Amino acid sequence: MQTPEHYDLLLARCRTLFLAKTHDYGTAWRILRLPSVTDQIFIKANRIRTIQETGVQLVADDVNEEFVAIINYCLIALMQLHLPKDTPLDMTPEAVALAYDHEAAENRRLLLAKNHDYGEAWRQMRVASITDLILMKLHRVKQLEDIGGAALVSESVEGSYRDMLNYAVFALILRGEG
């Protein structure tokens, strides 16, 4: 299967889970400030790394599901970044689906452009290295958040969320998902 098809399949799975949780919990995620979303992604990525390093997993939640959670939290961050400030905390399922689909489509476009330029180099990477890249991006985002986004030469927080989302997609593909 080619990367675009893998992306579509994995994002459809993530979307289904996200919209099911929206049914169950509403849009409780809207209360989260971006640093809280960043911390949630960090928790997921750190757990993956701990399991990779120790080879021991004491909680039944699958590592692949943690990568799915990273994808959905990155999409939450992107939605939070781009929703108008006056968007109510309680959004309709249709509005959530529309915002989710918009951000996922933007990310797909970025993934395909970077894949073209980098020649799908990620296919030669180890999943542990991808986990490390996610954690590195998280530390960068936390630093940018801590300095109020006043970066001199760095990529934006948005770009980092988009990269982390794509790294999680790559990890799932390498782990045989999709």
Image: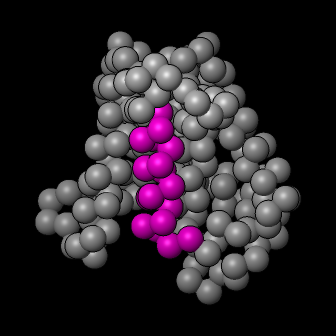
At a point 62% along the width and 34% down the height, the residue shown is 59
Q: Residue 115 falls in which quadrant of the image?
A: top left
Residue at x-position 31% and y-position 61%: 142
Hey, which quadrant is residue 61 in on the image?
top right
Q: How many marks?
A: 0
Between 96 and 109, the one nearer to me in the picture: 96
Q: Position of residue 53 (x, y in %)?
A: 37, 24
Magenta highlight: main SS:
helix
Is 175 drawn above or below residue 158 in the view shown?
above
Q: Is residue 108 left or right of residue 164?
A: right
Q: Quadrant of the C terminus?
A: top right
x, y percent for residue 43: 47, 49
The residue lying furthest to the front in this view is 58
Determine if residue 40 is in view: yes
Above or below: residue 97 compared with residue 68: below
Hey, which residue is sitting farthest bottom in the picture?
86
Q: Is residue 4 visible?
A: no
Verify whether residue 43 appears in magenta.
Answer: yes
Position above or below: 150 against 124:
below
Residue 111 on image: x %, y %: 46, 36
Q: Could you tell whether 152 is left or right of 86 in the image? A: left
**Seen in the image, is 64 located left or right of residue 135?**
right
Does the magenta portion include 113? no
Q: Which residues are magenta?
A: 32-48
Q: Can you give x and y, in whole percent of width and height, for residue 133 in the image?
A: 32, 36
Residue beneath the point at 65% across and 81% down: 87
Q: Say which residue appears at 79% left-offset and 63% top-offset.
A: 25
Colouring: one colour
